Image (tube, rainbow, N blue to C red):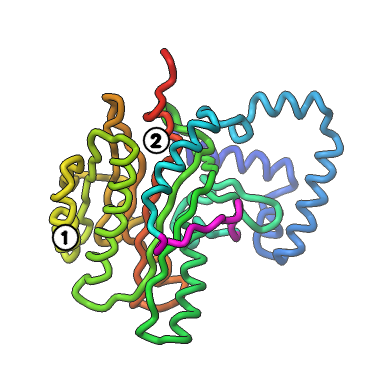
Amino acid sequence: MGDPDRSEGRALARVLRQAGGAEILNTLGVRLSGSELVTLLLAAFRTRAGLVTPADVLRRYTEDRFVAPAQTGARHLRRAEDLLLAGLPEAYELLTLAPVVPLGSHSAVAGVSQNNVLTTVRGSEVAADPTNGLALEAAVRRRELLERDGRSAPPVRLAALQRVIRAQRFSGAGRFAHFGLLALVTAGRDTGGLAFERRYAVEQLDILCAALEGAGAGTVDIALTVLEPAAVPVAEEVRAALAGRPAVVVRDDPDRSGGRGYYTGCCFTIAVVLNGQRVVLGDGGFVDWTRRLLGNGKERLLTTALSVDRLALALDPPAR
């Protein structure tokens, strides 16, 4: 297989030659203001849409992976959503997030490549993970609480069910262009001794383990990865707290490669065994997003997301 970055570079060079030279990229990306760029792009896509026929729309519908219906039926998805939400305590406010977030929410805050995000012409991008939208809302709420209460500002707990789109190409079972995620975020202040990290890692994992046990999981598999030696007490706290759940297995995963540079301190993967099949549902960990959004080194954020689609397929496997 060829280098995708090199292939993309060649494609861009070819398009720039057709468009009149590399200077156009600088004009569009830097010289025009945001509103000027939106005006230009709207006019361009209005012109292109005017050339589209109904037959073109139907052809695109059959070819574009972003617009196809979900592989899992709505009733199965709804059942999985209800099972997950049944264990969500009132302390976590369940939000209905917008389907889009500001341009750069995934790249500037979470370090995700902009190529993996579906960007709109209006200076926004389609949500690729509800934790990003929840983090923005948590930062706004934490800022207000800090202005009012200072160091005694309480933590912010938020949750959301959201259907998201990711532009990178996946292959294999349980991998989709768009899918539903249940996400939890807890934002608060570092009070010393890893108190925030230890308390809320246990809280979020306990909630999700209870929900997955209630969904009928024979085993809930939590794989912990300590990214920094200082975070060892967080992993120890999780192991001790979940030891009383016979259906939960907590193990170390020091060789995990994904998520390094994304998470800080400690992260984890969540899998279940349902109908004799082991299914990885999602992961979570600590990130520095609210710290950077608020410019406050004391801010802490824990995020977790589980795939509703994968859970639905595990609960109701398709007939062979």
Q: Mark 1 points at which residue?
A: 237
Q: Is there CB contact under 8 Å for labels 1 and 2?
A: no
Image coordinates for residue 1, horizontal then vertical, percent: 42, 27
- Secondary structure beneath dot 1 equals helix
Residue 295 — which label?
Answer: none
280 magenta-colored: no
User: Which of 160 and 251 lies nearest the eye of the viewer?
Assistant: 160
Q: Is residue 11 above or below residue 125?
A: above
At 20% across and 61% down in the image, what residue appears? 228
Under mark 2, the amino acid is Leu
Residue 280 is situated, as x and y percent measured from the top left of the image, at 32, 37
Q: Using the numbered discs, state the Cα–Cα distance from disc 1 to disc 2 in whole angstroms.
A: 27 Å
Numbered circle sitting on residue 311: 2
Q: Give the range drawn in magenta.
A: 90-102
Dot 1 crowding, Cα within 10 Å, few <14, some 14–19, many 20+: some
Up-down: is 240 above or below 306? below
Residue ID at (53%, 35%): 177
* Residue 34 image point, x, y percent: 70, 64
- At 77% across and 63% down in the image, what residue appears? 36
Mark 2: give few (<14), some (14-19) or many (20+) Cα within 10 Å: many
